[in-house]
Amino acid sequence: MFKMSPFWEKVFFLLTFIFQGSSFLHPAAYAVMHRRHHSFADTPKDPHSPVHLKNIISFNLATVTEYRKLVKEFLKGGRTISDAPRWYTLEWFAESVWTRVAFIILYFLFYVQFATSTWQFFLFPLHIFMGSMHGFIVNWFGHKTGYRNFDSVPDNSKNTLPLDFLMMGELYQNNHHRSPREPNFAVRWFELDFGYIATLALKRLRIIY
Ligand SMILES: [Zn+2]
């Protein structure tokens, strides 16, 4: 959908690492998994379809297994990609289990220092699994619950929320599967894709084109 200069690509790669932290997702592995999802949406070859993986545990296990397999292939050099960002050193560092553990310890220390009440520690697991939980919400509910604007789309994609304040537009899965190359996931008058608005801002700043 968009491109960046090598400089900005590195900046955003680094920011992705910093903000995803313990739940960092390897961009190239994610790209392959996502394209596979689109090519085989809600068929048995879909890496994460709630139509075929009916309980939450098997659904998440299948997604993690597929993802880990792809990361391994990329890190060992057995797989290449021409149109997704790569940063070999950072990928290796971010995917290390010790780096993930270090982030979890940092989050914990942050809570110990700044939490003002015990209940706030219930948010701690959400921080550890932030990236994977985002994926779970979009892939599970986006192909299970909601309304459809395009019944002709031959999969189970749904628009989960009429106003997607939660996933910044990612939950308009039915619209997205109808036009996968369209940067704006919103179609109806009441739908609003906040991710697309951010994209427009980055375009205006000439960070992406
Ligand atoms: Zn989808």
Image: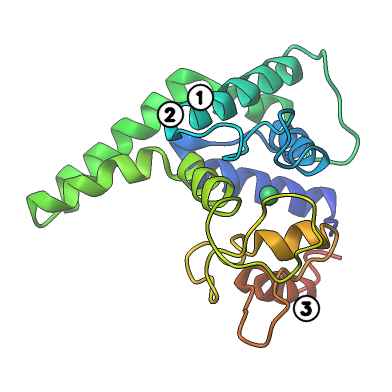
Furthest-left residue in view?
Answer: 117
**Residue named by callout 2:** 57
The answer to which quarter of the image holds residue 104 is top left
Q: Residue at x 68, y 15 (%)?
A: 72
Secondary element at tag 3: helix
Please name the residue shown 66% across and 67% down the image.
148
Q: Nearer the viewer, residue 148 or 38?
A: 148
Q: Residue furthest right?
A: 82
- Check mark 1 vs ligand 1: CB closer than 8 Å? yes or no: no
Looking at marks 3 and 2 on the same chain, the residue that comes earlier in the sequence is marked by 2
Residue labelled with disc 3: 204
In the foreground, 65 or 145: 145
Q: Secondary structure at mark 1?
A: helix
Local crowd at mark 1 within 10 Å, few (<14), some, or many (≥20)? few
Question: Separation of disc 2 and disc 1 at Cα?
Answer: 6 Å
Q: Which residue is mark 1?
A: 61
The scheme the figure's colours follow is: rainbow
- Asked if residue 107 lies left or right of residue 23, the reply is left
Residue 185: x and y in percent read: 72, 68
Q: Quote the CA–CA distance across marks 3 and 2.
A: 42 Å
